[in-house]
Amino acid sequence: MERVALITGASRGFGFAVGTALARTHHIIALARTVGGLEDLDDEVRIRGGSATLVPLDAADENGIRRLCAAIFGRWGGVDLWVNTIVHAAPMAPAPHIDAKDWSKSVTVNLDIARLLIECVDPLLTLKNGTAVQVTDPRAGQKFFGAYGAAKAAQDALFGSWAAELENTDRRVLRFEPHPMPTATRARFFPGEDRAWLSPPEVEARRLVRMLGLMPCPRRETGPGTPTG
């Protein structure tokens, strides 16, 4: 049976790299707001002999997420893997001077959307004894990272509770901390830094695949006319 991987935040950076790294072992359901980035990912997946369903959707659209998960159930009967890479890099600021709008958006994207996705994706993972992966970033408590760090720390706690609740089941919730990468998110925090020492997203995606212990499995034959969502 074909394996299915849901990648949320798949149009660029680490999410894009994870989608291409899984192309030979999974059908990729790629969610992001940026249509152009999703189309680029589809090209890369096809080059590797895989197939993708593209979902241009804002993950804050609760009704849209619920419709997506219902559609995934109807077409594939669940997901084997979910990798969440959606993140908002709130501007750096001293804690007493965090802008209220920046705080609100950081909490919405990094925490509220994560909670919604967990609620909706958990039943899909249950049906296939699947694995969820949270991408972590240890910024909590560092100076000037108040908004981003606090939201990511809360996200860690949320995923940690979910992981503990699944300890005696066949499902897994794993945390993966990539080495520093030259992504757009990092560039907002560290503009002008020497990017030569940073680890490419493709390298970190392959490291995640190795951690998951994924092996190729037979894929459904697809032709040039296979829909991409």
Image (cartoon, rainbow, N blue to C red):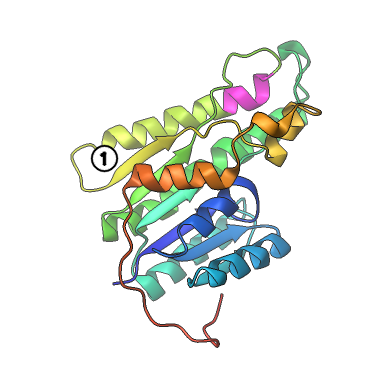
* Residue occupied by mark 1: 166
Q: Residue at x 71, y 13 (%)?
A: 95
Asked if residue 77 is positioned above or below residue 130 in the image, the reply reads below
Q: Is residue 89 left or right of residue 151?
A: right
Q: Which residues are magenta?
A: 145-151
Res. 18 visible in picture: yes
Q: Residue at x 37, y 45 (%)?
A: 210
The total number of labels drawn is 1
Quarter of the figure with residue 58: bottom right
Q: Is residue 118 left or right of residue 151?
A: left
The kind of secondary structure element at disc 1 is loop
Say if the magenta span includes residue 140.
no
Say if the magenta span includes residue 150.
yes
Residue furthest front in the image: 196
Quick one: quadrant of the C terminus? bottom right
Quarter of the figure with residue 76: bottom left
Q: Residue at x 34, y 46 (%)?
A: 212
Q: Is residue 207 left or right of residue 218?
A: right
- Please tell me whether the stretch drawn in magenta is mainly helix, strand or loop: helix
Dot 1 crowding, Cα within 10 Å, few <14, some 14–19, many 20+: few
Res. 89 visible in picture: no
Q: Position of residue 128 (x, y in %)?
A: 28, 60
Q: Give the amino acid at mark 1.
A: Leu
- For the residue pair 160 and 186, the one nearer the viewer reads as 186
Q: Position of residue 20 (x, y in %)?
A: 53, 59
Q: Position of residue 120 (x, y in %)?
A: 43, 54
Quick one: quadrant of the N terminus? bottom left
- For the residue pair 138 and 17, the one nearer the viewer reads as 17
Asked if residue 101 is positioned above or below residue 85 in the image, the reply reads above
Q: Residue at x 57, y 19 (%)?
A: 140
- For the residue pair 156 and 113, the one nearer the viewer reads as 156
